[in-house]
Image (cartoon, grey):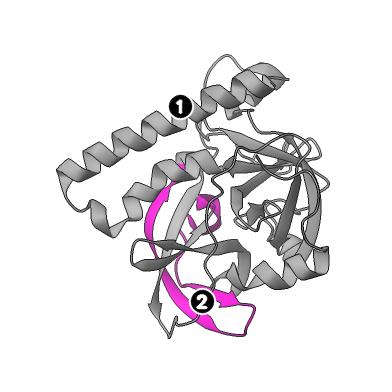
């Protein structure tokens, strides 16, 4: 379970883990954040799909001054997740972060290193308010919608971040006091636990809370980017395994937390 107490001072935490965070640029303009993750034999950038969806001329900047041209290797708009691969440049020595293998508990610390409102490599720290909400809880509970919304061609002015269209069963991590800035440079960067592990990918701001795609949802999409899943039979078995793990842990989280408000 994620630690409720700080295991390292904020300044030291920032220095320990900032190396894995990137700025994502489109035609040189900062669009959002991302994080390097080791996937099989490759070092890929994990980010939010809306940051790079239908975008060209993608590149990433690292905190050590290096820049890389990247391309999209896997994207799921309805899950707001995308994987990017470096196509030019020397990637030796890159710091890769990993997904948490701990259950995410309410009131545990969540750390954010990102670029809210284009302020590069900003560090903020908040707390988890919920780890069991879904987009469906927002659609059919908060907003009292009668049916699943579709993606809008033009952002809905009623929302700071128009997240309508994301799948209703997406599991979310809701955090308070992260001040991630929403979809103005902040999203796509990771929420980290006190061990420096990824608990979610920042997707949107809604009603003064910042929401990330839960790490369990990230697990389900690792298979699409792994080298070792080129065999259709192995891919099928791996998909079934990840699906079983996802639903077992999700059920456990809902029983423990039972937060649908």
Q: Secondary structure at mark 2?
A: loop
Q: Which mark is residue 94?
A: 2
Give the Cα separation between the discs numbered 2 and 1.
Answer: 33 Å
Total labels: the figure holds 2
Q: Which mark is residue 136?
A: none
First in sequence: mark 2 vs mark 1: 2
Q: Nearer the viewer, residue 257 or 35?
A: 257
Residue 54: image location, x then y, percent: 45, 57
Q: Nearer the viewer, residue 173 or 159?
A: 173
- Please determine whether, in this image, residue 208 is positioned above or below residue 183: above
Q: Is residue 23 visible?
A: no
Which quarter of the rendered picture does the C terminus lie within?
top right
Residue placed at 46% from the left, 72% from the top?
57
Q: Which residue is mark 1?
A: 247
Which quarter of the rendered picture does the N terminus lie within?
top right
Q: Which residues are magenta?
A: 48-77
Residue placed at 48% from the left, 45% from the top?
218
Residue placed at 53% from the left, 32% from the top?
170
- Please determine whether, in this image, residue 25 is positioned above or below residue 116: below
């Amino acid at each position: 379970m994620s630690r409720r107490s700080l295991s390292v001072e904020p300044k030291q935490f920032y220095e320990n883990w900032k190396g894995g965070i990137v700025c994502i640029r489109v035609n040189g303009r900062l669009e959002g954040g991302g994080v390097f993750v080791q996937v099989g034999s490759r070092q890929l950038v994990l980010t939010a799909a809306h940051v790079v969806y239908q975008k060209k001329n993608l590149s990433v900047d690292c905190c050590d001054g290096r820049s890389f041209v990247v391309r999209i290797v896997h994207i799921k708009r309805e899950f707001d997740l995308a994987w990017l691969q470096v196509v030019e440049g020397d990637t030796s020595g890159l710091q890769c972060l990993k997904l948490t293998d701990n259950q995410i508990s309410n009131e545990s610390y969540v750390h954010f290193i990102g670029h809210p409102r284009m302020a590069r490599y900003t560090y903020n720290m908040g707390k988890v308010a919920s780890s069991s909400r879904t987009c469906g809880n927002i659609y059919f509970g908060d907003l009292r919608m009668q049916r699943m919304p579709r993606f809008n061609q033009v952002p809905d002015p009623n929302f700071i971040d128009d997240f309508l269209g994301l799948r209703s069963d997406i599991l979310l991590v809701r955090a308070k006091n992260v001040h991630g800035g929403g979809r103005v440079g902040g999203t796509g960067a990771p929420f980290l636990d006190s061990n420096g592990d990824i608990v979610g990918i920042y997707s949107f701001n809604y009603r003064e809370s910042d929401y990330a795609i839960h790490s369990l949802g990230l697990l389900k999409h690792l298979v699409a980017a792994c080298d070792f899943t080129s065999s259709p039979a192995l891919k099928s078995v791996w998909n079934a395994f990840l699906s079983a793990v996802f639903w077992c842990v999700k059920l456990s989280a809902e029983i423990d937390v039972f937060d649908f408000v």
